[in-house]
Image: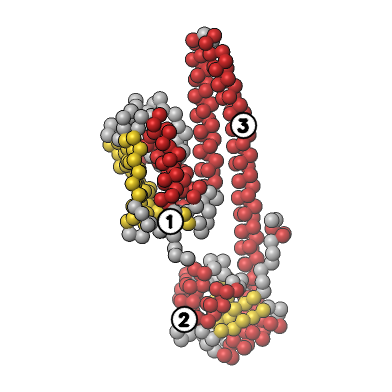
Amino acid sequence: MSVSEEPKPARLVVVIDDDEVMRLSCKEILRKSGYEVECFENGQAGIERIRERRPPLLLVDLKMPGLDGFQVIEICRKLDPELVIVVITGYATIGTAVDAMKAGAYDFLPKPFTPDELRLIIARGFERRRLMDEARALRREKEDAERRFVSFVAHQLKSPLAAIKQYLDVLLFTMGDSLPEKAKLWVGRCQVRASDMLELISDWLPLARLERGALCQAGAASELGEVVKQVVRDHEHAAEAARVALELRLEEGLPPVVGDGLALAMLCGNLVGNAIKYNREGGRVSVELARAGERAVLSVRDTGLGIPEAQVGRLFTEFFRVSSEATKEIAGSGLGLAICRKIASELGGEISVESVEGVGSSFRVELPFAPSP
């Protein structure tokens, strides 16, 4: 949707003031100027109405019995961060105005005020709301354009690379025995490089989406145990081929965690895949899911190559790969763990690692449980 197509905000003003005369005055003045006005004598009633109708602008008195204006501002700011709030008060001081602005108010109108002063400040508030709506529409357009661009570039790069790799596979399969040893060596190296590029592009696409917060589905919740089970099943063949034992232990009855299945599967899959890839023949990978307070804890431990102590701090950096004699022949993009960290962070969780070179590594992911419906 273009900026010009963005629907104009409703001309609704909610007035919260315990003074009946003030409420009636504001209502009469603003209605004559074409605004829809709803008035409430206490903060609780006004907040409930704001929750229902989501008005663009709130006019609130600071000094009221029960919930005062500062408390109303705090609650309304959580309900709608884009709500434009104008404070009115008969106890106007510079300190009060500063405190109101810090609490989240947009403007300040001392009592008594003239009809023109009220109309001016309300018009200014609606102009601010219009600019905020336009800025949001522009951000959405930019994000959509970036998403289309990333998808287009990834597709345009993957298609020819996949074709090249297929041609090389066919060449080795049909003519491998007749090729000179050096030619077979070069073709094999081309295959490896093409596979590396395909892996890099596959990792780059979700990473680019994560940078815009576009990979994890907002408000989603998933059974992490089911996701982990499927990830382990998907990696059984790779573990068997690498001669690595893959173990799974799940605590039953865990509540759903924050996050959609796709993002959680990518997070778990990267950790389990790395634990297998960087293991040793006859090694073991242990995957465990348990509860710790109000969070689910996923642990992935391996008896593999481990990470040099000096490199552990850079492990979640984009494009960083562990550099050692044991890992130099292992292909990878250096994006998998960066993606894991961004997913965990976006979902309100965290990821950590403990590792001893030559002994193995242990990754721990904590994710919050989803709020009850």
Q: Residues within 10 Å of mark 1 (few under 14, many from 20)?
A: many
For the question of whether residue 355 can be seen, the reply is yes
Say what secondary structure mark 2 lies in. loop
**Answer yes or no: do the residues labelled 1 and 2 have beta carbons within 8 Å?**
no
Q: What is the three-letter code of the residue carrying label 1?
A: Val
Sequence-first tag of 1 and 2: 2
State left or right for residue 61 relative to residue 130: left
State left or right for residue 283 relative to residue 61: left
Tag shown at residue 159: 3
Q: Residue at x 48, y 56 (%)?
A: 221
Residue 113: image location, x then y, percent: 60, 84
Q: Residues within 10 Å of mark 2 (few under 14, many from 20)?
A: some
Q: Residues within 10 Å of mark 3 (few under 14, many from 20)?
A: few
Residue 122: image location, x then y, percent: 63, 75
Mark in the foreground, 2 or 3: 3
Q: What is the three-letter code of the residue carrying label 3?
A: Ser
Mark in the foreground, 1 or 2: 1
Quick one: which residue is furthest to the bottom in this view? 21
Sequence-first tag of 2 and 3: 2
Cα separation, mark 3 vs mark 1, equals 36 Å
Q: Which residue is disc 1 drawn over?
A: 257
